[in-house]
Amino acid sequence: MLIYDFHIVGNKLLAFRKKIGMTQAEVAEKAGLSDRTYADIERGTVNMRVETVLRICEVLRITPDEIFVDDKPAMYLEREKLMERLDSCTNKEREAAIKLLGIFLDSLN
């Protein structure tokens, strides 16, 4: 599902920026924008041009899909399926699965 709400897009940009540890000023500079313009984009008060979106995505190392497409419904469905499978496991199997998930998530950082 496409996202048309620039407040949501701005919040996603904020989350991606924080995840890689950049400031608004750093993103703005690397994307060729003023600090004020980038701050307004994150607040969702500015309608961006395609070129601006692409430059920001390049700086944040993301794709436009990551900010304009909401894939949560599919992700929530998948999560529910996994939780049902986990619930059907024995305690020992469940503990092993949770431990493996923890190890995998730690490896992402």
Image (tube, rainbow, N blue to C red):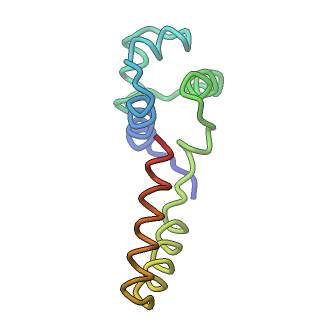
The answer to which image quadrant residue 32 occupies is: top right
Q: Position of residue 51 (x, y in %)?
A: 65, 22
Residue at x 54%, y 59% (from the top left corner): 71
Up-down relation of residue 26 to residue 10 (above or below): above
Residue 87 image point, x, y percent:
40, 87
> Closer to the camera, 23 or 95?
95
Is residue 3 rendered to the left or right of residue 23? right
Residue situated in front as seen by the camera: 27 or 10: 27
Residue 27 in picture, x, y percent from top left: 47, 17
User: Residue drawn 52% across and 55% down?
Assistant: 70
Residue at image coords 44%, 12%: 26
- The answer to whether 79 is drawn above or below residue 92 in the figure is above
Percent of width and height locating residue 29: 49, 8
Residue 13 horizontal side relative to residue 62, left or right? left
Residue at 43 percent across and 40 percent down: it is 12
Count of labels in the image: 0
Which quarter shows the N terminus? bottom right
| Of residues 26 and 65, the one drawn nearer to the viewer in this rendering | 26
User: Quick check: 94 above or below 31?
Assistant: below
